[in-house]
Image (cartoon, helix red, strand yellow):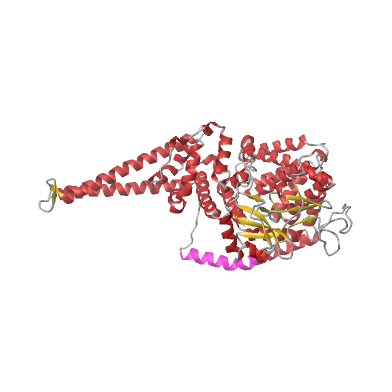
Amino acid sequence: MLWQALMAARDLGRLHEIASILIRYGFGDMVRRMGLANALERTGRALRWNEATELAQLEPPARVRRAMEEMGPTFVKLGQILATRVDLFDPEWIEEFSKLQDSTLPSPYPEVYQQLTEDLGAPPEEVFAAFDPEPLAAGSIAQVHRARLADGSEVVVKVRRPGVRAVIEADLRWVSRLAEAIETGNTELRHFHWREVVRQFNQSLRRELDFAAECRHAERIAANFAGYSDPDSTVPANQGVAGAVAEPHGLPLLIVIPKVYWQWTGERVCVQEYIDGIPGRDLAAVERAGLDRKVLARRGVNAVLKMIAVDGLFHADPHPGNVFYLPGNRIAFIDFGMVGRLSDERRDQLIHLLLGLVQHEPALVANVLLDWTGTGIVNEEALTAEIQTFVDQHLGMPLKQLKLGTMLADLVAILRSHQLSLPPDLVLFIKAFISLEGMGRELDPELDLAGEALPMLREALLVRYAPAALAKRGWHAASEISKLMSDLPRDLSQLLRAARRGRLELHIDVGHLKHVGDQLDGATNRLIVGIIVASIIVGSSVVMTVSGGPTLFGLPFFGLLGFVFASIGGIWLILSISRSNKAERESRERKP
């Protein structure tokens, strides 16, 4: 399957570019092992193996990070995701992945102008009263321009880079095949669920390419914050808050999500309200504006905790670049291209885990982590003992001194030391939580994150186990049981009927046998070729004894032609066996 993907004509140009970058950074051996070299050279795309530069002398983590930067948006996004995978990589790798920044030079404006005209249905100068061709910011997938509507509303126009989808789709096909090859050919890496990690990454990146989906996420999160208030707020009802949008009860919106203008929003472009606030990185401007950093930190933490623990739909990238501070100590979130979703079951687990960390209950933490390990082989006693020791180290520590993000990262490192990995759907949660704590402590070094989290976690737990919620879940469970019982006689009847007719089938899918099956297929093909070659030789020998007919060099032409084909088949057979043996040796060398 990997070979088929590599041979796809639509990907050859991109694969040649990737292979050239890998060679330049000293990863030529990996290019050969993955089959990129043979696939490209057979199509006439030669690789320059002497292009390795002084960059190849860097440490492996730095080389990988620099190569990912050059390989483009897909790999930058992948590196940012891998930066959260402390269960997969050592700290030095995490540090390098964390340096990957989603910023680059903007696309040429004529290309952007042409695409905008197609998407808006008219040139930008006709749609907007004013449009700035110089972008406010440019990332690997999109760039943002400022504009003004006819009614005077200030907006931002987010435009997808022309041609970026084709590049990303080619990259995703290649990354998916690579993950499959790793899982089927490398037993020590199989338990990290590479295919599942890449599958979720593919889904996340494809959603990020669809700006309409991003705007739908923004509106859902805005709806979740409708009516949200801060009981300790000192801001009077919409007083002293210039431009604040008021709720029906008169209080200003404490958490602001940009309004979407759907008449000009689609897959490749979105138009949203312009947020005129202080960027999250500019703490000096926060001080000059007279905003309360402690209040901002607490409100930001509570907002993200609400998204995670209560709503189950959260901003997965709440770094300072996606946050603005507004008058009245209000907070605005932008850029909902990367959001996380948590099922009810996962939210229950996270609530119990965070409560266990805050309340120093190691058994609760251990139970959740053991649930997360799934069916992996684990020494439960050793893992539980290590978790208990870790939690006991923080026993008696004031809540204000607990760093929940750091504790989560340390817990996942414990899983990694036991060759266990997180469920892939928790990656974005860990990323969001660590970003949340870092941003909160930048605003307020004395931020009591655990103290802020504890009441909300308890409240969320009470809501989950309130009589009405229990009754609702009980009703759903009773309905499922009733349906199962009503279907049971029919299912048993069908099962017995199939057994009587001799049509009862048992399907067993053993994943690791796929590799064995592939080897058997290859061996069978070589055996068939060998039989055909032998048949041709025998047939040609018979033809050589028959007089008459055309000749070449004094020998019967058809007999000679048969020997030529037999020779070609024999040479192919020898080369095929040689390549197979070489691949098997390399596979054994890679195994510990």
Query: Residue 439: where, in percent of width, then height?
Result: 75, 44
Name which quarter of the figure residue 224 lies in.
bottom right
Q: How many marks?
A: 0
Name which quarter of the figure residue 571 lies in.
top left
Relative to residue 401, is residue 520 drawn left or right?
left
76 versus 117 height, above or below: above
502 or 445, which is in the foreground?
445
Q: Main secondary structure of the magenta part?
A: helix
Relative to residue 57, is residue 91 drawn left or right?
right
Query: What residue is drawn where x is 67% and y is 41%?
Result: 412
Q: Is residue 270 magenta?
A: no
Q: Is residue 451 visible?
A: no
302 or 167, which is in the foreground?
167
Query: Residue 536: where, in percent of width, then height?
Result: 23, 49
Relative to residue 377, is residue 16 drawn left or right?
left
349 or 71, which is in the foreground?
71
224 or 164, which is in the foreground?
164
Range of residues picked out in magenta: 483-501
Query: What residue is drawn where x is 44% and y is 46%?
Result: 516
Q: Is residue 543 visible?
A: yes
Kindly give the residue lying farthest to the left in the view shown: 547
Query: Residue 180: where, in percent of width, then height?
Result: 51, 48
Query: Residue 13: where, in percent of width, then height?
Result: 46, 49
Q: Is residue 494 magenta?
A: yes
